[in-house]
Amino acid sequence: MKHQDKQDNASPPLTGTKARTQRLLIDTAMAMYEQGAFPSITEVAIAAQLSRATAYRYFPTQSALVSAMVDESLGPILAWQPTQPDARQRIAELLSFAYPRMLQHEGVLRAALHLSLQQWADNRSNPNNEEKLVRGNRKRLLKMAVEPLEGKLSPEALQRVVYAFSLIYGSEVFMVLKDIWHLDDAGIQDVTQWMGKAILLQAETDAKQAAQGESEPLTP
């Protein structure tokens, strides 16, 4: 499901007491996740001093709760709009804008990764399991970032660039650069910016080589 589909299917916003209750549950859950916990909906309800039934009315599944927390954490990022005309500048702009926010809410994003891996394991044993954590905002943002490359790269090459950027724009980076290599926040941002430049440089090099190959006369 893409971001637009998610928006189209979204329920109307709650108001009054219901909105405050939902906010209390989200804030309580986010605080628990940021402290390194992975609470169940029941545990969130207890911490928020609400009944289990009340919590489940707002968030019937763990996926619903985590999705709400991710949306809350990444709200400003999801509203990002590029201000630069050049793809290289746009990628640098997106990474510079997004990573401080992602690092600020690292606990929630790790919870989303944890749940995604858990659902993958559950689906292997139960293929009919319909609970899914909807993820698709990354695609939309990256496509906006590389839009200036349309017409300059072939569709296949452009898609490869998007795939490559998907590996450096997201919380999965934490697992490698922070957990394995123990980089600090500044180090993570430095490496991802460098990788972004390298991806674009390789794409440009490939495009030039392809163009030269097409322009070379055929030998008899």
Image (cartoon, rainbow, N blue to C red):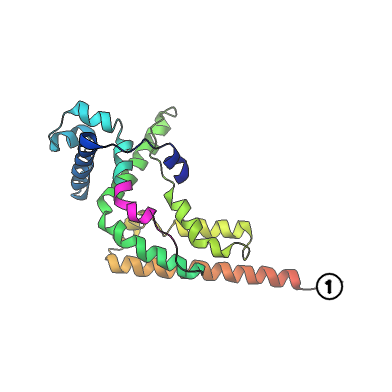
Asked whether 65 falls inside the magenta stretch, the response is no
- 64 vs 78: above or below: above
- Specify start and end residues of the magenta stretch as a single range: 71-82
Residue at the spot 22% in from the left edge and 46% down from the top edge: 30
Amino acid on which disc 1 is placed: Thr
Residue at the spot 29% in from the left edge and 51% down from the top edge: 73
In terms of secondary structure, where does tag 1 sit? Answer: loop
Location of mark 1 (residue): 219
Q: Residue furthest right?
A: 220
Residue at the spot 63% in from the left edge and 68% down from the top edge: 207
Please, what is the dominant secondary structure of the magenta stretch? helix
- 108 vs 213: above or below: above
Image location (x, y in percent) of residue 100: 30, 62
- 116 vs 189: above or below: above
Question: Could you say which quadrant of the image residue 39 lies in?
Answer: top left
Question: Could you say which quadrant of the image residue 171 lies in?
Answer: bottom left
